[in-house]
Image (cartoon, grey):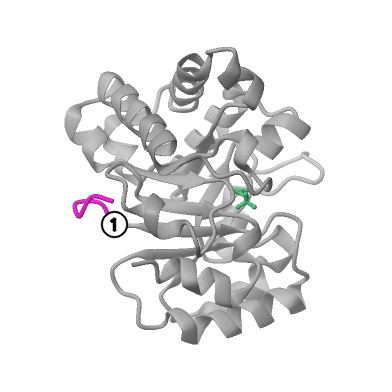
């Protein structure tokens, strides 16, 4: 953590939580994090639960993220959701290019980039996810993969928009597996991402960029991760599905 950058703790609920369950989770969470002022708290429900969470968290210190969006404004794209639809439900952030979407739904650096551009054009703040698989890490391709995903995801993004972008480093081998990258391993890649952004933009932009770590973050390991100089937040799957554990993450010391 660096005092210059405001920490951001986001929950990615994935395909969990009906609208009713989502309302219940959000209501229980509100009092547990009500006194938090110095960090951003973000919930990422599935599309069908966004409205019920939006209603529940209205007027609180919690923001909403969607888990995906389409890059076109509107039209014949059956099953897709537009930026305007998300903004209408008070979404502030959108998670883009999660490894599950890259692996199971054919997302590429090109489609990820179209989504990042569309979110910025429409006023949503993108959380751009990057991360290597275990095979890529073991084959010594970590730097290449991260550089490619960062460069590809940010292609044609103006410097003036970069303060709206959050990057989430999520090693694929650590997602939902209980295997967390060590704080040192994670920080090394965060520093690499910052270096890449410095080369693409400037030292000032790289310094201001918030980079979250994601991959089996729990209340037990969040503080050591957040103590690292280049880790500015967490993107959390499993541990975000219970109000007590998500609140413990938000309240990390
Ligand atoms: C995620 O999917 O973004 C994630 C990090 O999941 P988990 O915390 O369950 O590993």
Span of residues in magenta: 1-6
The image quadrant where one finds the C terminus is bottom left
The residue labelled by disc 1 is 6
Q: Position of residue 154 (x, y in %)?
A: 43, 27
Compared to residue 184, the image places residue 15 above or below, namely below
Q: Position of residue 26 (x, y in %)?
A: 60, 78
Mark 1, other Cα within 10 Å: few <14 / some 14–19 / many ≥20: some
Nearest to the observer: residue 116 or residue 210: 210
Q: Position of residue 134 (x, y in %)?
A: 63, 26
Q: Residue reaching furthest right?
A: 78
Please name the residue shown 51% across and 40% down the image.
181
Is residue 3 magenta-colored? yes
Nearest to the observer: residue 227 or residue 231: 227
Relative to residue 82, is residue 195 drawn left or right?
left
Which secondary structure dominates the residues rendered in magenta?
Answer: loop
* Circle 1: element type: loop
Is residue 207 magenta-colored? no
Relative to residue 236, is residue 37 drawn left or right?
left
Q: Is residue 21 visible?
A: yes
Q: Quadrant of residue 53?
A: bottom right
Relative to residue 110, is residue 75 drawn left or right?
right
Q: Quadrant of residue 38?
A: bottom left
Compared to residue 252, the image places residue 190 above or below, namely above
Please name the residue shown 61% across and 44% down the image.
179
């Amino acid at each position: 953590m660096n005092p210059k950058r405001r920490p951001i703790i986001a929950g990615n609920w994935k395909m969990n939580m009906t609208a009713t369950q989502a309302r219940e989770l959000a209501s229980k969470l509100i009092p547990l994090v009500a006194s938090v002022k110095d960090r951003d708290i973000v919930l990422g429900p599935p599309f069908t639960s966004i409205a019920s969470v939006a209603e529940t968290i209205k007027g609180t210190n919690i923001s909403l993220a969607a888990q995906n969006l389409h890059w076109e404004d509107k039209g014949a794209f059956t099953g897709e959701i537009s930026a305007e639809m998300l903004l209408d439900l008070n979404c502030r952030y959108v998670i883009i290019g999660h490894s599950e979407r890259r692996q199971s739904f054919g997302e590429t650096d090109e489609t990820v980039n179209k989504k990042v551009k569309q979110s910025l054009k429409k006023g949503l703040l993108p959380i751009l996810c990057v991360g290597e698989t275990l095979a890529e890490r073991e084959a010594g391709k970590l730097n290449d993969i991260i550089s490619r995903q960062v460069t590809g995801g940010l292609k044609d993004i103006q410097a003036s928009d970069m303060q709206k972008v959050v990057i989430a480093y999520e090693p694929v081998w650590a997602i939902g597996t209980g295997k967390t990258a060590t704080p040192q391993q994670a920080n090394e890649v965060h520093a690499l991402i910052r270096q890449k952004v410095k080369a693409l933009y400037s030292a000032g932009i790289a310094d201001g960029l918030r980079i979250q770590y994601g991959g089996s973050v729990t209340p037990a390991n969040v503080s050591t991760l957040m103590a690292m100089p280049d880790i500015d937040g967490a993107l959390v799957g499993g541990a975000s599905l219970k109000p007590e554990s998500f609140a413990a993450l938000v309240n990390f010391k």
